[in-house]
Each structure stands twice: as C-alpha cells, then as structure tokens.
Amino acid sequence: MHKFYKSIAILFFTSTLFSNASTSNTINSELVNMVKEQQYLAKKISNDYVAFEADQDNPKKKEKMQNSIQHFNQNHLKLIEYKNNTKLIDEKLSKVDKIWQIAHKLSQTKKHSVMIVTTMDDISIKMQELRTLYSKMSK
C-alpha cells in the first residue's frame, strides 16, 4: 500500500512539473509573437503616419494610425509588466519605452514624419533584439 501512495505522489509531482514547463513555454511563445507583432506595428505606424500626414483631412487614415498606435501601446505595456523578464530584457524594454514616449508624442503632431519613421525604425531594431532574447527564454 505504501508503494502505491509513493507512485501516486511521484506521478502527481511529475505531471505538475511538465504542466508548469508547458505553461512557461506557451507564455514565452506568446511573448515572442507579441514582439513580432510589435515589429510589424512599428513599421505600420510609420506608414500610417506618412499616409495621414499626406492627407490630413481623411478621417479613415487618422483612425487607422491611431488604432496602430493604441495596439502598439497596449502590447508595449504588457511586455513591460511581464514579471519574469530577465534583467537584460527589462533594460532593452526601458530603452524602447524611452524611444516610444518620444514617438508617441511626435505622432500627435502633424509635421514630423521623418522623425516618426526614424524612431519607429529604432524601435523595430530593438524589437528584433527582444525577439531573440524571448526566444532564448523558451528553450
């Protein structure tokens, strides 16, 4: 009878370990996908801003740009708030945050497309670095 309880306990702990590892890999995969999306959104914000600046009377272009900015910002906050980020990831996210604050303020004006494109390109490069770091976490 004693062996039976030991076997049950071992099975329980083993399944818990595998379950936690699986959950961790899923979360890391989601983070990698979010960073990929951030790279895409950085380019999209640049394009949307340039299109809006060329035709400022078009409400659809403004709305499209604002939606891209809002989506980027939501993802950005989720990445920053993730509690299991490494110190290096936190440092890189902090750099992205500083650049993003500038880009976000500039996006509210109507005449800085070159600066917006440059800052969003910088963010895209930082996102590639973060993508590599998050990918390493999932291994």
Image (cartoon, rainbow, N blue to C red):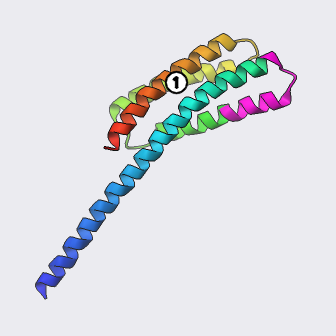
Q: Which quadrant holds residue 102?
A: top right
Is 74 colored magenta in this rendering?
Answer: no
Q: Image point 64% across, 17% down: which residue? A: 116
Q: Of 84 and 41, which appears nearest the observer?
A: 41
Question: Badge 1: how crowded within 10 Å, few (<14), some, or many (20+)?
Answer: many
The quadrant of the image that shows the C terminus is top left
Tell me if residue 84 can be seen: yes
Judged from this view, the residue extending furthest toward the right is 57
Q: Is residue 66 left or right of residue 125?
A: right
Residue 134 screen position, x and y as percent:
39, 37
Q: Is residue 31 left or right of residue 61?
A: left
Residue 20 screen position, x and y as percent:
33, 58
Which residue carries the number 1 mark?
124
Q: Which quadrant holds residue 117?
A: top right
User: Which residues fall within the magenta stretch?
Assistant: 54-68
Residue 109 screen position, x and y as percent:
74, 17
Q: Image point 58% across, 23% down: which residue? A: 101
The type of residue carrying mark 1 is Ser
Residue 61 screen position, x and y as percent:
79, 28
Q: Is residue 118 left or right of residue 12?
A: right
Tell me if residue 81 can be seen: no
